[in-house]
Amino acid sequence: MQVLKTVAAFRAARAARAEVGDLGLVPTMGFLHEGHLSLVTRARAENTAVAASIFVNPTQFGPHEDLARYPRDLDRDLRLLEAAGADLVFTPEPAEMYPPGFDLSILVGGVTDVLEGAVRAGHFAGVATVVAKLFNIVQPTRAYFGQKDAQQCVVIKKLVRDLDMPIEVIVAPTVREADGLALSSRNSYLTPEQRAAAPVVFRALSEARRLFDAGERDAEALRRAILEALSKEARVAIDYISVADPLSLRELATVGRQALASTAVRLGPTRLIDNLLLGDARA
Ligand code: PAF
């Protein structure tokens, strides 16, 4: 496995690999968990070579968010990536991605003003810009993202479509702990008490799925069920509860074949997001 810190070094390493046919890319911000590794494993199975990136992207953090304390462990990440079968790892410093004079921000319209975008101003412009740069640098055949960040997946698919990038965006199912908590690098912030409370998020979304499967199609009734389930846990402060169209992310009145049930909550200073697809094409 080769670890490359600069754009030039990555490009040279990619070019030197005569055997690179299909290249799968797993973009990450590091502090890897089984969710990331499942993406690498899938990329390994579906491509002739696998690249991963580790970059804590400053432009997707708001001024009062957790950029400074975002967990980092590069040595451990590299060991895990090597064991999972990555061939190339891109680990740039911020100055490599955003050199002096850098002045670009990609605004993906239509799907970034709701849900996470409504709460985290500028977040998706930061994500879209860095992902566009990573796609340009790595030039993957396929790129792999987790369904846990459902809105990010919608934004990236739209980015790729609107910019005619020849890249297949693959969204893989959320990986969960045994008690349902979606894996996230930010789970490491939780105190033991907060960690014990956190599975309420999955339980609440599962209740919406249970009602949907039982025939409930009134989106407000589904939102109410999520609210009631979350309210059983006093430590949880709710940012939003949504039952939306999975592509447009607009709130639904009545659910047809599919909906994205999602929520963001705060447990102390830590924000957790999660979602479940209702209807076909579950993840
Ligand atoms: O999901 C993440 O870890 C990040 O948002 C991404 C896609 C690597 C962009 O910084």
Image: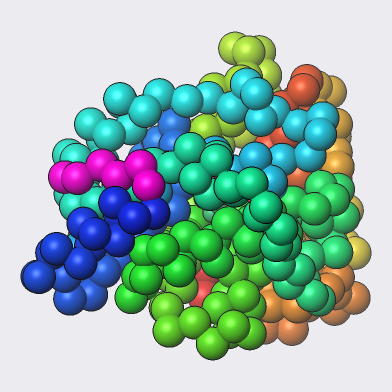
Q: Is residue 73 visible?
A: yes
Name the side, left or right, on which 197 lies relative to 83. right
Q: Position of residue 232 (x, y in %)?
A: 81, 31
Q: Position of residue 132 (x, y in %)?
A: 55, 66
Nearest the viewer among 64 and 14 is: 14
Segment colored magenta: 1-6
Nearest the viewer among 257 and 13 is: 13
Name the side, left or right, on which 97 lies relative to 232. left
Quadrant where the image shows the N terminus = top left
Which quadrant holds residue 147? bottom right
Nearest the viewer among 224 and 162 is: 162
Relative to 160, does residue 114 appear above or below in the rendering? above
- Residue that appears at 17% across and 39% down: 83
- Residue that appears at 74% across and 83% down: 256
- Residue that appears at 36% across and 28% down: 74
Residue most extreme to the top: 192
Residue most extreme to the left: 19
Q: Position of residue 259 (x, y in %)?
A: 70, 72
Relative to 173, does residue 67 appear above or below in the rendering? above
Q: Position of residue 236 (x, y in %)?
A: 80, 29
Which quadrant holds residue 242? bottom right
Name the side, left or right, on which 202 lies relative to 109. left
Name the side, left or right, on which 235 lies relative to 69. right
Nearest the viewer among 193 and 266 is: 266
Q: Is residue 135 magenta?
A: no
Q: Is residue 2 magenta?
A: yes
Q: Is residue 260 visible?
A: no
User: Tag count in the figure?
Assistant: 0
Tell me which colouring the rendered structure shows.
rainbow
Which quadrant holds residue 14? bottom left
- Residue that appears at 85% across and 64% down: 113
